[in-house]
Amino acid sequence: MENSEKKQELYPKNGEVTFLMPNTNAIGVLKKAQKGRSLTAKYMTVEDWQSEKGKEKLCYFLGFKESVDASGEVYYLAKLHDGDTPFVAAQTILVQSLANIPVGQGVSITCTDVVKNSKSGKTALFDVVELDVNLMGRDDE
């Protein structure tokens, strides 16, 4: 009987792995290097939006990521970048507002309020405005 599980394999094939080793000069430069912008995406919760209430957040829309909740329901995360930090947000009102704009589009997002919802939780309300800039080069059309 054939094992239907796929065996993990290292690449390059046959488990041969090559490491690039930095020289001592490169290590010294690394130790003195300044930190740049964050590459770790932050998940924006309703509480995060509430703390930003009334503040405009200028971002690039980077598309959607499909996810599944604990009960197996599919939902979408909006992927955004504000110039300093990448972040994702799953608030329905925000996701629906971004549904028909192209990837790379600049947007202004302002959390206008946070209200109680019917499921004993909170819902963030947004004002989302399209900006006249697109990361993918459509800003000059």
Image (cartoon, rainbow, N blue to C red):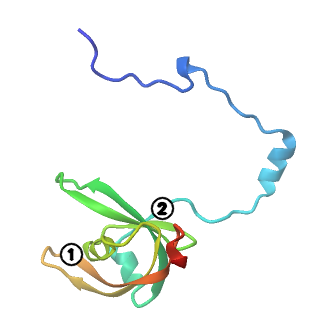
Q: Residue at x 23, y 8 (%)?
A: 1
Q: Amino acid at mark 1?
A: Gly
Q: CA distance from mark 1 to mark 2?
A: 24 Å
**Residue 109 horizontal/vertical position (percent):** 41, 82
Residue 100 point in image, percent of width and height: 31, 72
Q: Residue at x 24, y 78 (%)?
A: 122
Q: What is the x, y in percent for residue 46?
A: 33, 75
Q: Earlier in the sequence, mark 1 or mark 2?
A: 2
- The residue pinned by badge 2 equals 41
Q: Is residue 67 left or right of residue 87?
A: left
Q: Nearer the viewer, residue 87 or 119?
A: 87
From the viewer's perspective, is 69 left or right of 15? left
Does 134 sit above or below residue 66?
below
Above or below for 91 versus 2: below
Disc 1 element: loop
Query: Which residue lies under the disc numbered 1?
Result: 121
Q: Residues within 10 Å of mark 2 (few under 14, many from 20)?
A: few
